[in-house]
Structure formats: structure tokens, C-alpha cells
Image (spheres, rainbow, N blue to C red):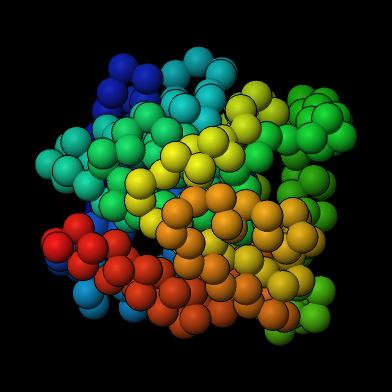
Amino acid sequence: MQTKTISTAKFPELYYRLSGTGNVIILLHGFPLNGTIWDDVVTKLSLNYTVIVPDLPGAGQSSFHGTELSIEDMAESVKAILVNEGIKNAVVAGHSMGGYAAIAFTDLYPEMVAGLGMIHSTATADTEEKKEQRRKSIALFEKGGKDTFIKQMIPTLFAEQNREKFKEEINSLTEQALLTESKSMVAFYNAMINRPDRTNTLKTATMPILWIIGGNDGIIPPKNLIQQTSLANVNFVHTHEGCGHMSMMEVPEDLADNIKSFADYCFNKAAH
């Protein structure tokens, strides 16, 4: 595995890890985590593919200038990495907030996307109720309540019946998330509040779409996603029963298989 850092005008440090050889899969993490959430999946995928795992700007070892960040900025950071590596196209898959960045990237640079993976993520914008919840959380972060928020939030990412089993993972994710600066937390939530509805991107997509749904996902429930899974022309849909919002930890082997078979299809299709 190689680790690299590049610098652009907007992003003083963009950190990413590169493993394996062959066609490219790029995996984008969700909020308020970093690229290490994919470790178990990367081990398996890198046997057949080049796997690139960035820390999105403001997360992990990546930073951004100023205080504001948009989902489109996150997409631009993905472009900067692919350009730096001389990569013309990739399967771009994102978890939760990373999915918002992945679909924004697909919107902006469709020619660079061999396939789009929406992993516990949605193409729709926030509802007014959700925006209001996020604004309350932002007020909390600004008052210094970030740590309390994170300690309460991280366990809810896992299916209730899995929380005891994944106690160690929950503890280590919590420690990792606590390193995320309040400035980044505020920027991430504002980016999510301001993101547009991108269901039209699905309707006009020329590339296949992968959907990973947690049967027990309390963050993005299956019922919110099912209608979206038929909007594109070609959809791969996997619902993992007994899984919450964190398939890369709750069912990593299954998720790696799902992504691999999807990438096999995308790149074989491109070859014909």
C-alpha cells in the first residue's frame, strides 16, 4: 500500500492510500469518519483492482482552506486525485456523505465514472426536518458539544443487535471521529444541508449504479431508498438483512463481493 498527499489551491493537503493493480475503484468514506473504515474491504478488492481511498477534505489527514466546504468541493478533491494518478475512469463508490460526493462527481464528470456505488446513501436532498436537525447539531458543535454528539452518534451507525458484537470497532471509530475538528463537522453538515436533489443524475445515468442497503439501517432506512433503485437504466441492488449503516464493518466480506462483481460488470461492459 502506498500513501500519498497532494496539494491544490482549495486543499492544502489531500491524503489518499493506493493498493493493488488493475482497473480503479475509489472508495469515499462518510461523516464524521475517514478512509480507514474501508480497510477490511480494501484487503479483498485490491487482489483484483487498484483501490484508492482518500480522506475527504477536513477528515483524517486531509484539510481544506477557509471554513466552508460543499459536496461539489469533495467531488473536486476526487477529480484532483484521479488526475494526479493519470486515471481516466473509475468505479466511484461512496458511503453515506461519501455517496453524496460520489453522485456529485458523477454529475460533474460522467465520462470519468465507469460505475457509481451508493453505499447506505441517497440521491435525494435533505428534507426540511433533516436540515433542521442538522442545524441544531451545528449549534451544538459551535458550543463545544462535538464530543458528546460523536459518542452518542457512532453506536447508532450499527444495527442495534450488532452493537455488542462490534463494541471494539465502535470504540475505535469513536476515537477516530473525535479527532475530526469542530470546523470540519460544521462544514460537513452545511455541505449536506445545501446539497441539491440528484435523482435526475440517476435518471440520465449512462453507467451502472450499485446500491447497498442495510436492512436495519437507522440512518437511511431501506424504505427511503427502494424507489431510487429503479431510476437508472442498470441497477445492482443488495440489501443486507441484520446490517445497519456500516456494511464495511458489519458484513465486510459480503460488501467486498458486491463491489467486486459490480466493478467486474462495469469494466467488462466498457471493454466491449
- Asked whether 161 or 58 is in front, the reply is 161
- State the count of labels: 0
The residue at 74%/54% (across/down) is: 224
Look at the picture and state if 18 lies above or below 189.
below
Can the viewer see residue 33? no
Look at the picture and state if 227 lies above or below 168.
above
- Asked whether 152 or 232 is in front, the reply is 232
The C terminus - image quarter: bottom left
The N terminus - image quarter: bottom left
Compared across the picture, whether 158 is left or right of 136 comes to left
The residue at 17%/45% (across/down) is: 87
The residue at 44%/40% (across/down) is: 204
User: Can you tell which quarter of the image residue 107 is in?
Assistant: top left
Can the viewer see residue 136? yes
Compared across the picture, whether 12 is left or right of 102 comes to left
Percent coordinates x, y for residue 243 in the rendering: 68, 75
Compared across the picture, whether 210 is left or right of 147 comes to left
Compared across the picture, whether 152 is left or right of 63 comes to right
Percent coordinates x, y for residue 253 in the rendering: 46, 82
User: Can you tell which quarter of the image residue 88 is in?
Assistant: top left
The residue at 83%/30% (across/down) is: 128
Look at the picture and state if 190 lies above or below 125.
above
Percent coordinates x, y for residue 180 in the rendering: 59, 41
- Asked whether 85 or 238 is in front, the reply is 238
Percent coordinates x, y for residue 37 in the rendering: 50, 62
